[in-house]
Image (cartoon, rainbow, N blue to C red):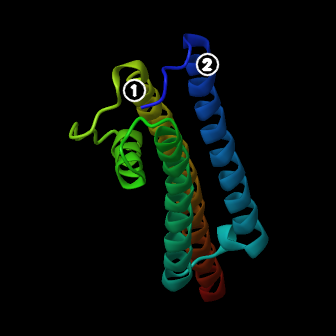
Amino acid sequence: MPDQPSMLIMILSAGGLVVVTVVLHAVGFSALLRALIRSGALGKSGFLSVTHFVVVLACWLVLIHLVEICVWGLFYRWHGCLPDAESALYFSGVTYTSVGDGDLVLPKPWRMFAPLETLTGVLMCGLSTGLFFAVVSQWISKAIYSKTELESHSAAVKH
């Protein structure tokens, strides 16, 4: 393992990882939202259409999280915290998602990075959940509004 970096370098590195993670999430989040708006997906209704966009939304969000996990994992590997890339990416994945199996741990000088990655991962997952909820709520509102409109129109035609 390389020489231990100074405390200042470690604090700046930790802060930098958090900032990079949040920026990646914001950029991915923004691109996803723009694509949904541009495609008219938020105004869609119907089982197949909504199902298609739920799958796309979920896959895109998972991809964003995977990129963020890779950033942390590659950082761990670059600094020699874990023996190989597979271990570093695995450790990052279970840490980011707060699974935390405990079968791999960071060396003592780096161990505070694990709870910081977990906290960051939980916050990013919360943002993704919020977006998912907002988009699905939009589709539900659209479906309810369309059904109410149709019922009102049918009632008006009968009279």
Residue 80 vs 59, above or below: the answer is: above
Residue 147 vs 159, above or below: the answer is: above
Residue 19 vs 43, above or below: the answer is: above
What mark, if any, has residue 96 been given in the picture? Answer: none
Q: What residue is rendered at 48% in x and 48% in y?
A: 69
Label 2 sits on residue: 9
Q: What residue is rendered at 33% in x and 45% in y?
A: 94
**In terms of depth relative to the viewer, which is nearer, 105 or 133?**
105
Q: Which amino acid does label 2 sit on?
A: Ile
Q: Which amino acid does label 1 sit on?
A: Pro
Quarter of the image with the C terminus is bottom right
Helix, strand or loop at disc 2? helix
Q: What residue is rendered at 59% in x and 77% in y?
A: 45
**Where's residue 30, x and y in %?**
72, 53
In which image quadrant can residue 101 be found? top left
In the rendered image, the residue lying farthest to the bottom is 158
Residue 114 vs 154, above or below: the answer is: above
**In terms of depth relative to the viewer, which is nearer, 137 or 122?**
122
Label 1 sits on residue: 115
Left or right: residue 82 versus residue 70 is left
Helix, strand or loop at disc 1? helix
**Where's residue 18, x and y in %?**
59, 32
**Where's residue 124, x and y in %?**
53, 41
In the rendered image, the residue lying farthest to the top is 7
What crowding class fits label 2: few (fewer than 14 Cα within 10 Å), some (14-19), or many (20 or more)? few
Label whose residue precedes the other's in the sequence (1 or 2): 2
**In terms of depth relative to the viewer, which is nearer, 96 or 46?**
96
Quarter of the image with the N terminus is top left
Disc 1 to disc 2, C-alpha distance: 18 Å
**In terms of depth relative to the viewer, which is nearer, 54 or 122?**
122
**Where's residue 22, x and y in %?**
63, 38
In which image quadrant can residue 35 be found? bottom right
